[in-house]
Amino acid sequence: MATRIIDQNDLIEATLRRVDLFAPWPAEVLIRMAAGSQLWRFAKGEALYEVGAPARGIFVLVDGSVIDGRTSSNGRIMATSILRPGWPLGVRATWSGNSYGYTGTARSDLTAVLLPRAQFREAVLGDPKRLEALTDFFCTQIAQDMEGLRLRGLGSPRCVMAGYLAFLSRPTFHISADDPGAADPTAFDITQDELAAMLFSARQTVNRLMKAMEREGVLRREGNRLRIVDFLKLLAVMEEDEPVHPAWREQIVAWDARLKALAAERPATTGKPAQWAPASSPRA
């Protein structure tokens, strides 16, 4: 069972500050939101929120990750994405007061902040600029979702898988070319079963496509982690059917340039790859 953690207000506030949507808001607003929020510990396999349940608030992960999806009446699993620390989960449902559209399941033991609906709405409605920022957030989310639907509906399995690998590599909740050095997009953990649920495909298909991309020098498997070793090659696979959205293309090209710059700085004496240098301030 989920366990509430008390007397950690500083951690709650720091976690909310990691959310791109909240970061520009005044300190006093974030302090009030943090004071009304709760910190919870979830065990692996527990649901933070469940499809059809009334939205009680926004979840922001302190650590760990969540897989977002739902199971059909015939037992088939469909997943949308893997969600990471600092990303706001359940914003639409929380704002509207509707039910959650998916179930968010902990992929490992994790800690998460719950920002209740009342505190969130009070903060947004208190200033026109914050309401405008939320509107922009929703517009960006809709555009991203439409791109995902286009990819799944029109793309070949190979292109769809490449698109999901790029999507899983992004360091922010929304596709963005801003600050490509803020996080290392090259490695992420995911199982073949999880990727198959996202592609709505068989695990064997995922394995076959993955092996082909390994041979082509697109990615490398490291246990349950995937490492993209050449983003331009990944982009070429994504665009075998048709060009991707310009913002997404710009982000992927920026990642590739960053990795190549790091490779050029590799110390000749060690032969080891240069480490990704995070930005000075944390990003979602």
Image (tube, grey):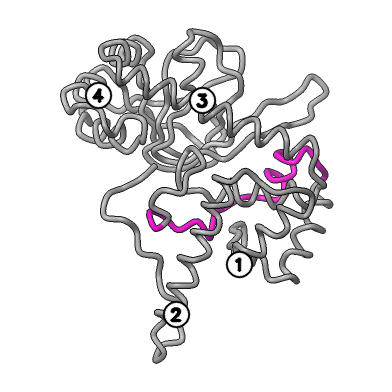
Lower sequence index among marks 1 and 2: 1
Q: Where is residue 276 in the image (x, y as percent from the top left)?
A: 40, 65
Q: In the rendered structure, which segment of residues is drawn in magenta?
A: 181-202
Question: Helix, strand or loop at disc 2?
Answer: helix
> Residue type at mark 1?
Asp
Lower sequence index among marks 3 and 1: 3
Question: Helix, strand or loop at disc 1?
Answer: loop
Question: Helix, strand or loop at disc 4?
Answer: helix
Q: Which of 131 and 76 is in front in this view?
A: 131
Q: In this view, does 129 lie to the left or right of 107?
A: left
Distance between the Cα atoms at labels 2 and 3?
Answer: 38 Å
Question: Which residue is rendered at x = 37% and y = 24% of the image?
Answer: 133
Residue designated by label 3: 139
Distance between the Cα atoms at labels 4 and 2?
Answer: 43 Å
Question: Which residue is rendered at x = 74% and y = 59% of the image?
Answer: 210
- Which tag is nearer the camera, tag 4 or tag 2? 2
Distance between the Cα atoms at labels 3 and 4?
Answer: 26 Å
Question: Which residue is rendered at x = 70% and y = 49% of the image?
Answer: 243
Q: Quadrant of residue 264?
A: bottom left
Q: Is residue 207 above or below residue 43?
A: below
Residue designated by label 1: 230
Q: Quadrant of residue 125?
A: top left
Lower sequence index among marks 4 and 2: 4
Q: How crowded is mark 4: few (under 14 residues within 10 Å), some or many (20 or more)?
A: many
Residue designated by label 2: 264
Q: In this view, does 212 lie above or below 172?
A: below
> Residue type at mark 2?
Ala
Residue designated by label 4: 34
